Image: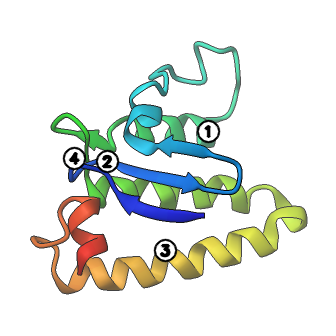
Amino acid sequence: MIADRAQSTTSFRYKDPENNITWDFAKFASHIPHSSSSKLNLRSSKLDDVVRCFASVIQDGNQIDTSQLLKACRAHLVLIQSGGSALRLVAKDLESNLQKVEILFKKSPREAKHLISLLEI
């Protein structure tokens, strides 16, 4: 896949030229329902935390708040870690990637306030 920046600085489009597929993250993210798992009759406080955290990630229109995204990813990590040995490798990989991004974010939190800015660092 080839990633290129769309005309809007808050939108990313991913193109797969072989299959003629274009995917716009901002459009996808704007259609994610903001319901808690309790409304869906699911009983998992960890899942509720993940849903709650990801619901606050997109702010100011289509801006993705980096600190909220990292918080949501940490909540997702806790959920994955509760999956036991079947998800152990996935959890370790996610945790490693999160640590790298958190180090970069902590170096310049003002410049990396939104995800687009963090990606440009």
Q: Which disc, if any, is residue 98?
A: 3
Residue lying at 25% horizontally and 52% vertically, measured from the top left: 65
Q: Disc 1 residue type? A: Leu
Real-space CA distance between mark 3 and mark 2, rounded to the nearest whole angstrom: 22 Å
x and y percentages locating residue 59 in the rendered image: 22, 39
Residue that numbered label 1 is attached to = 47
Badge 1 element = helix
Foreground tag (4 vs 1): 4
Towards the viewer: 114 or 72:
114
x and y percentages locating residue 73 in the rendered image: 49, 58
Mark 3 Cα shell of 10 Å, populated few (<14), some (14-19), many (≥20): some
Q: Are marks 4 and 1 in contact (CB under 8 Å)?
A: no
Residue that numbered label 4 is attached to = 8
Q: How many marks?
A: 4
Q: Are marks 4 and 2 in contact (CB under 8 Å)?
A: yes
Instruction: Quarter of the image for the C terminus: give it.
Output: bottom left
Mark 4 vs 3, N-terminal side = 4
x and y percentages locating residue 22 in the rendered image: 54, 44
Residue lying at 31% horizontally and 47% vertically, measured from the top left: 11
Foreground tag (1 vs 2): 2
Residue lying at 25% horizontally and 39% vertically, measured from the top left: 62
Mark 1 Cα shell of 10 Å, populated few (<14), some (14-19), many (≥20): some
Vertical placement of 75 versus 25: above or below?
Answer: below
**Residue farthest right in this picture:** 86
Mark 1 vs 2, N-terminal side = 2
Q: Disc 4 residue type? A: Ser
Q: Disc 3 residue type? A: Leu
